[in-house]
Image (cartoon, rainbow, N blue to C red):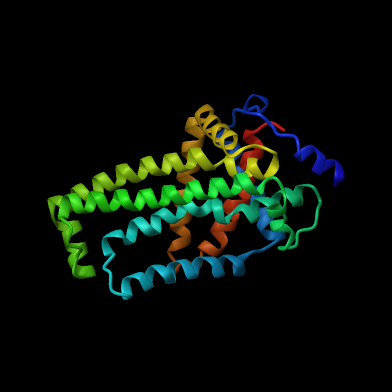
Amino acid sequence: MAQEKSFRDVEVRLSEIGIRKISVKDLWQALKEGFDDFNAKPSFVAFLIVVYPLFALLLTLFLVGENLLHLAFPMVAGFTFLGPVVSVGLFEMSRRRERGLDLSWRSAFDFVHSSSFAPILALSLAMMLLYVAWLFAAQFIYFGLFGAVPPDSISDFVTQVLTTRRGGALIFYGTVLGFLFAVAALAISVVAFPLALDKPVTAITAVCTSIKAVASNTLVMAVWGLIVVVLLAAGSILFLIGLAAVLPILGHATWHLYRKLVEP
């Protein structure tokens, strides 16, 4: 342990971090390894505790007076931007499991006492800012098409979106904008969070490495992004209960994807 701590005190520079080329087969292997980690330390309850309060908060915002129906989908979709933030504990569990260390939930957050905490905090703030920017952009598009008056009811909103030209434009521009934000979130975070947890790097080095890894494996990482979207959509079908399994599996799998992308 002393040797590990002394090693982690030596800052790693961007030029010292090698990026591998991976294939789609590596993605399926990462998912399998993530599922194995989930089975070794199930976290259904932990993620139910996290997921449901978030959506309860969303529902509360609708009920307290301010009409946010036009932001309902952007708010839910944008939660994926925060996935890496809430998955840090899962990355640490996978890291500890591959080293044969203690797998208690308390130990999963020991990183707050290490040099990893500052870059992880900075990365978390960056992802939260990206989420807020996405909501502002979505609202800007809606107000630009429909004006500053929010819809009166759910049925009115659905009718406007599905039966008018402005609704079609909203779907088109929202999809394009959402895609750009999703690409940015993937490029910034997919390697950055695990790297910041695993090695003594700055937040900037972690982000640059993540972007470099995605750029070096563009098509494969596009497939990974599609896999994430499909699994999250599937997990959301049964009143979000499926997310209690999908989210931790994806979190563990992301750690193993990082291991395949970044050279030791």
Instruction: Find residue 40 and report its image quarter.
Output: bottom right
Residue name at image x 25 percent, y 50 percent: 140
Quadrant for the C terminus, please.
top right
Instruction: Find residue 70 and report its image quarter.
Output: bottom left
In the drawing, does residue 112 fall left or right of residue 127? right
- Circle count: 0
Q: Is residue 206 above or below residue 170?
A: above
Q: Position of residue 12 (x, y in %)?
A: 69, 32
Residue name at image x 48 percent, y 41 percent: 186
**Near-viewer residue (14 or 263):** 14
Q: Is residue 248 above or below residue 63?
A: above
Question: Residue at the top extreme?
Answer: 15
Q: Position of residue 58 (x, y in %)?
A: 39, 67
In the drawing, does residue 88 fall left or right of residue 62? right
Q: Position of residue 63 (x, y in %)?
A: 32, 75
**Near-viewer residue (129 or 39):** 129
Q: Position of residue 159 (x, y in %)?
A: 17, 63
Residue name at image x 61 percent, y 44 percent: 119
